[in-house]
Image: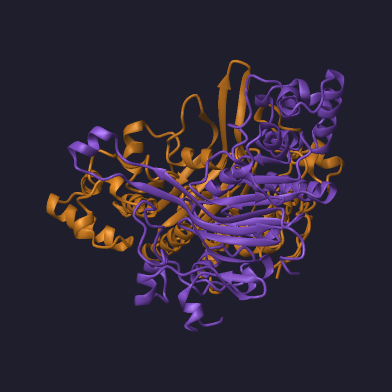
């Protein structure tokens, strides 16, 4: 639990950009929703990298744009939403502007997705064996027998008891946790390099959630699969992720190694967010409270989007929008950490 | 603190609630199926003292929300009794007496999107309990009271003329709380009041609920599946599993020294947000189907301490120490290891 070698690999991605390009690189992503009353900017200038085998947690409140970022990466933005700027690179190759047919080659095979609700992401009319073999045959060049064997292996791997019998069962014959295991097996079918897991445990009970988190973490270690874990639950992130990106009003507020962000948050929003979570063992009468609510997309304040709710806000926050700046071992979009002309080496 | 010193505000004894989940009559005859019953609540007893927060925790389907609905009278109990301030709720027959009793408690629901009438303005929503119970007649007095309530929950009196869709989730939950406070209740049943909200908004609502408790001396029955929230809010906690209470203890004891294997498992599932490297109990299995619960102790298929006796006979909830009750054979037989 204390050893987190992958966290270190993740952190090094930024220091050596000249080397091999990261698995996924999102550069200045901007997503717009054109509407009758003007254009809404849902994602504004978001940049981050995901290294091979790394679990990047993406956390934020409803409407912060975390799911939208995931959908944009896998090319499943719902119209009228569109990528209006920036780029998404997989191994250095742009994938944000690929024609639908080329994107279908990537989707499922190189980037897979796990959705929140395991009941709606499985077809109720087919057995899970049929669904697994169909997915395997669509992506891999193997025969039906081999595909079924692979399906059995996958079911064993995600911890479904008696897979030989269960493979011919329908989704409704599985419990919620077992269904989510099947969905994870589906995502693993073509051995993708990156899995986008959008709130994979939100619909599950706490005792099942813990099992699914452990499973996800184990599989990523074994297959060196990178995961973007989108969730609103900081607890899940703390247990699972190597690095975490905190989103606020369509922008990145802070990104860094999970231990740093959880234990020593730098951005005032992250600090408020961490303080507002009740913790066992701490006897506090009142929780830290961030007054107000996240702005609506049509009324994002000037400068730093968080400044009206920020206790530390000053003049510059109201006028100028901060970029991600080095704040100790993490990077925060906050003027409390202005870049100095000759940066001190961080220990 | 002995329980017998003062009369508890709420005493629930051997409460049961059974739902008929049989197929329609014709199907039962053609398919030769018997009637099927779902024991949502199966013999639950607890007391809540004045001014305290008693929490019920458990996973989905454990019956915690059913208990909340039984307590406020939204469901009829199949057996057992609910006594509020010494009066057995079921034995009150006269309408006026019942209304006098009903006026003393209120409920806050989980989903602030579904529990507010979208066609009503906020002032009408908040004033509804005042009108229903006939507390005030004068329209101006009512609107003064509504303004006071809205201020109390951190909204502006001018918000009264808006509709619910103009508010965010957290603000809607504030409206729900203002409505619940309108008839000056002593006792609030809160069924997952923050589960639909984001964490920062959850903190605002939990702080508000604590402030109101301090200011008005409210008593809460707090239903939640989130153990960290329960630890923060409750004085005493009851843990439910498949319609039964498996452990009751004061909050500190329960979280520091849990006795029942299910409580221990639940505590192990709390994500370790401080990253201190806790977590030694492994979590296995899922909640079984409550229509066909396991025999004996319903937790035995998932329990590391289960024996033949656990499979045969259901354990009673018995006092283990001064402020801790548990229903487990292993504890009585000394098989449960302290950790």
Q: Nearer the viewer, residue A158 or A139?
A: A158
- Quarter holding the C terminus of chain A is bottom right
Where residue B70 appears, x then y in whole percent?
A: 56, 45
On screen, residue A302 versus residue A142, left or right, reads right
Please indicate, yes or no, whether residue A154 appears anywhere in the rendered image: yes
On screen, residue A345 versus residue A8, left or right, reads right
Residue B126 picture quarter: top right
On screen, residue A117 versus residue B70, left or right, reads left
Q: Nearer the viewer, residue A332 or B13?
A: B13
Q: Nearer the viewer, residue A118 or A66?
A: A118
Above or below, B110 relative to A58: above
Please indicate, yes or no, whether residue A54 appears anywhere in the rendered image: no
Residue A115 picture quarter: top left
Above or below, B330 relative to B169: below
Q: Nearer the viewer, residue B16 or B166?
A: B16
Where residue A206 appears, x then y in whole percent?
A: 50, 57
What tint does the image give chain B?
Answer: purple
Above or below, B258 relative to B292: below
The orange chain is A
Where residue A259 appears, x then y in whole percent?
A: 62, 64
Residue at point 29%, 51% (across, down):
A190
């Amino acid at each position: 639990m204390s050893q987190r070698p992958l966290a270190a690999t993740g952190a090094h991605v930024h220091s050596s950009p000249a080397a091999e390009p990261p698995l996924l690189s999102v550069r200045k992503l901007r997503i717009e929703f054109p509407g009758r009353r003007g254009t809404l900017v849902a994602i504004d200038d978001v940049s981050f990298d995901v290294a091979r085998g790394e679990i990047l947690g993406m956390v934020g409140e409803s409407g912060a744009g975390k799911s939208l970022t995931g959908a944009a990466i896998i090319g499943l933005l719902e119209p009228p939403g569109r990528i209006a700027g920036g780029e998404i690179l997989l191994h250095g190759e742009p994938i944000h502007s690929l024609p639908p047919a080329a994107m279908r080659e990537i989707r499922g095979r190189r980037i897979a997705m796990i959705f929140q609700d395991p009941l709606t992401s499985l077809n109720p009319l087919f057995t899970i064996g049929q669904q697994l073999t169909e997915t395997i045959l669509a992506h891999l060049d193997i025969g039906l027998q081999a595909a079924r064997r692979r399906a059995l292996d996958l079911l064993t791997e995600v911890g479904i008891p008696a897979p030989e019998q269960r493979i011919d069962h329908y989704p409704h014959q599985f419990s919620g946790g077992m269904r989510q295991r099947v969905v994870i097996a589906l995502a693993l079918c073509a051995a993708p390099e990156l899995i986008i897991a959008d709130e994979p445990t939100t619909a599950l009970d706490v005792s099942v959630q813990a099992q699914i988190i452990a499973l996800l973490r184990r599989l990523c270690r074994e297959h060196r699969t990178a995961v973007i874990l989108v969730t609103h639950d900081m607890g899940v992130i703390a247990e699972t992720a190597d690095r975490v990106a905190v989103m606020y009003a369509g922008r990145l507020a802070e990104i860094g190694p999970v231990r740093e962000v959880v234990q020593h948050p730098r951005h005032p929003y992250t600090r408020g967010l961490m303080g507002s979570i009740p913790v066992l063992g701490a006897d506090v009468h009142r929780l830290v409270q961030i007054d107000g609510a996240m702005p609506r997309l049509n009324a994002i304040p000037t400068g730093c989007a968080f400044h009206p709710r920020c206790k530390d806000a000053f003049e510059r926050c109201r006028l100028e929008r901060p970029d991600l700046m080095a704040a100790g071992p993490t990077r925060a979009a906050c003027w409390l950490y202005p870049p100095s002309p000759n940066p001190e080496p961080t220990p | 603190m002995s329980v017998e010193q003062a009369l508890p505000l709420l005493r629930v004894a051997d409460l049961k609630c059974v739902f008929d989940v049989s197929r329609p009559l014709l199907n039962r005859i053609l398919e030769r199926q018997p009637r099927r019953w779902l024991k949502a609540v199966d013999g639950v007893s607890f007391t809540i003292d004045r001014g305290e927060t008693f929490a019920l925790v458990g996973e989905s389907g454990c019956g915690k929300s059913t208990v909340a609905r039984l307590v406020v009278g939204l469901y009829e109990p199949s057996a057992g009794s609910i006594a509020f301030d010494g009066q057995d709720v079921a034995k009150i027959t006269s309408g006026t007496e019942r209304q006098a009793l009903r006026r003393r408690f209120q409920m806050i629901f989980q989903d602030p999107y579904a529990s507010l009438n979208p066609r009503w303005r906020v002032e009408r929503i908040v004033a509804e309990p005042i009108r229903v119970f006939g507390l005030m007649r004068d329209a101006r007095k009512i609107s003064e009271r509504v303004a006071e309530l809205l201020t109390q929950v951190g909204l502006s009196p001018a918000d009264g003329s808006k509709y619910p869709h103009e508010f965010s989730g957290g603000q809607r939950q504030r409206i729900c709380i203002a409505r619940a406070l309108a008839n000056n209740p002593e006792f609030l049943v809160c069924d997952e009041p923050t589960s639909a909200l984001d964490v920062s908004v959850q903190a605002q609502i939990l702080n508000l609920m604590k402030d109101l408790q301090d200011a008005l001396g409210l008593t809460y029955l707090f239903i939640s599946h989130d153990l960290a929230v329960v630890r923060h809010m409750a004085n005493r906690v009851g843990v439910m599993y498949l319609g039964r209470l498996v452990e009751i203890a004061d909050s500190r004891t329960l979280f520091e020294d849990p006795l029942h294997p299910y409580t221990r498992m639940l505590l192990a599932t709390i994500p370790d947000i401080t990253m201190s490297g806790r977590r030694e109990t492994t979590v296995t299995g899922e909640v079984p189907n409550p229509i066909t619960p396991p025999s004996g102790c319903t937790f035995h298929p998932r329990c590391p301490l289960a024996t033949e006796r656990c499979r045969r006979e259901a354990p009673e909830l018995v006092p283990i120490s001064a402020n801790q009750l548990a229903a487990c054979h292993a504890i009585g037989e000394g098989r449960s290891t302290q950790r």
